[in-house]
Amino acid sequence: MATGYPGNYGSTVPVRAPRTLRRDSVTFITTFGTSHTAAGQVVFPRIHRPAPSLVPARDGLKPHPILLPEPDPMLSIKNLSKTYANGVAALTGVSLDIPTGMFGLLGPNGAGKSTLMRTIATLQDPDSGTIHLGDLDLLANKAEARRRLGYLPQEFGVYPKEPAITMLDHFARLKGIVNAKERREVVEALLRQVNLWDVRGQKLGGFSGGMRQRFGIAQALLGDPRLIIVDEPTAGLDPEERNRFLNLLSEIGEHVVVILSTHIVEDVTDLCPRMAIISRGQVLLTGEPREAMASLQGRVWRKTVPKAALARYQEDLVVLSTRLVAGVPVIHVLADARPEEGFEAIAPDLEDVYFGRLRAQAAASAA
Ligand SMILES: Nc1ncnc2c1ncn2[C@@H]1O[C@H](COP(=O)(O)OP(=O)(O)OP(=O)(O)O)[C@@H](O)[C@H]1O
Ligand SMILES: [Mg+2]
C-alpha cells in the first residue's frame, strides 16, 4: 500500500485504514445482528469497511504518514491449463480478468469449475499459466495468497460434533488470529453476520444445508480476505435459504472479488454483474450477462409444441431449451428469422445464452 503525506488541511485523497491494522479490531463489521422488515424478511447486516480517515496535519507539526487508497484488486488469470494424470484435460488455456464484485462462473458438470477454483485457491498447481491478484503472483507466493483469500469448497467438511462457535474459533486460530480477545470479537461478528449467532452452541452435524453453507461463508470471511472463492454453494438449498445465501454474498461482493461457481443460471442472472461460461475446460464467453443477452436480441423464438413432435424440432432447429409447462413442452429456438408459424419472438434470457454457447461448442467439436 502506498503512503503519502497530507497537506496542512489534510489529504484530499480518501484514505483507508491499513489492512494489517484492521485485524486489530472488528470495525470492518459495524452493524451487528440482523433485522427484519415488516414482511418478516431477514435483512443482513452490511459488511462495512472503515470510513476513510484523514489524518489532520496541525500547524507546526510534522505531517503524519498516511495511507493512500489501494486500487481495487483485479484477479487476472492467464492461459491456465491442467491435465490430470488420467488424461482428462480439465482446463485448456483459461484466461479471465475478474474485477471487484460478484463474478459468476457458469458451467455444466465436469466443466472444470472446481479445478479452476482449487487452482486459484492455491490448493493445486496448474501445468502452465499464471494468476495474479493485483500485483501478487498467487502461484509463486502461496502463503501470502492464502492470507488474502477465503475459500468455500464444493464439499465443505466440518467436524459434526463441534459446536459452530468452537469450530469457527478454531478456523480463526488457523487463519492466524492469535489474540484471544480479537478472535472472540471476530468470531462473534461473523456468526452474527451470517445469522448463526442464535445457534452458535449447536453442533455442526445438526445444521441444515443452508446453515452449513452460511457457516462455510463465515469461515471463508476470516482474516478479511480480498478474494473469496465459493464453489457451487447454492446446490441443494431451498429457495429461501438460497436467497438468503445469495444476499449475503452480494453484500460481501460490494468490496472484494467474489467468484461464485454454479451450474444454476439464475444464480448468475440474479447476482453477478460479470460472468464467464466455461465448458470442457474452455472459456466460451466472458462479460456482462446483460450484454450477452442483448447479443441474442431478435433471435430467440418460443413455441409450445406437441410432445410427439419434439424430436423433429430438435433435429430440424437449434433448440436451446425445452421446458415442460403443465406437462406440455415449450421450446426456445435460436434462429435469425421466425422458423415457422406459431413461434413468437421473446426477450433472450441468460439460459438462452448459456445453452446457445454450449450447443455451439458441441456442434464445433462434432464437425
Ligand atoms: N483429481 C482428479 N483426477 C482426475 N480427474 C479429475 C480430478 N478432478 C476432476 N477431474 C476431472 O476433470 C474434469 C473437470 O472436473 P471439475 O471437478 O473441475 O468440474 P466441475 O465443473 O467442478 O464439475 P461439477 O459441476 O460436477 O462440480 C472432469 O472431467 C473430472 O472428472
Ligand atoms: Mg465442481
Image (cartoon, helix red, strand yellow):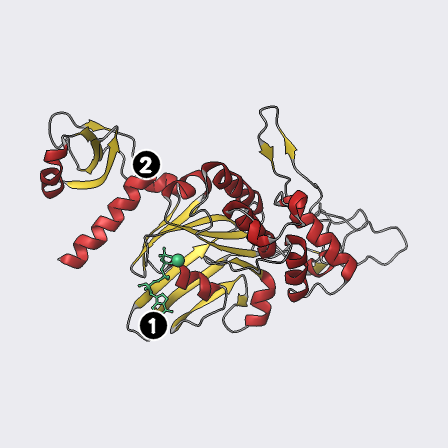
Q: Quadrant of residue 169?
A: bottom right
Which amino acid lies under the numbered mark 2 shown in the image of this protein? Asp
- CA neighbours of label 1 inside 10 A, class few (<14), some (14 to 19), many (20+): few
Q: What amino acid does circle 1 point to?
A: Tyr
**How packed is label 2: few (under 14 Cα within 10 Å), some, or many (20 or more)?**
some
Residue at 25% in and 50% down = 358
| Among numbered discs 2 and 1, the one appearing first in the sequence | 1
Query: Viewer-proximal residue, 298 or 85?
Result: 85
Which of these two is toward me, 62 or 306? 306
Quarter containing the N terminus: bottom right
Q: Is mark 1 within 8 Å of ligand 1?
A: yes
**Residue 13 in view of the camera:** no
Determine if the C-beta at disc 2 is less than 8 A from ligand 1: no
- Which residue matches tag 1? 84
* 212 sits left or right of 171 in the view: left
Horizontally, is 332 left or right of 205 in the view?
Answer: left
Residue at disc 2, secondary structure: loop
Q: Is residue 338 left or right of residue 115?
A: left
Name the residue: 33% across, 42% down.
292
Image quadrant of residue 355?
A: top left
Q: Residue at x 25, y 35 (%)?
A: 323
| Distance (Cα) linking label 2 and label 1 | 35 Å
Among all residues in the image, which is located at the extreme right? Answer: 60
User: Which of the pair 94/204 is nearer the observer?
Assistant: 204
Are dots 2 and 1 in contact, CB under 8 Å? Answer: no
What's the mark number on residue 243? none
In front: label 2 or label 1: 1
Q: Residue 65, position in %: x, y?
A: 77, 59
Q: Say which residue label 2 marks.
A: 349
In this view, which residue lies farthest toward the bottom?
A: 85
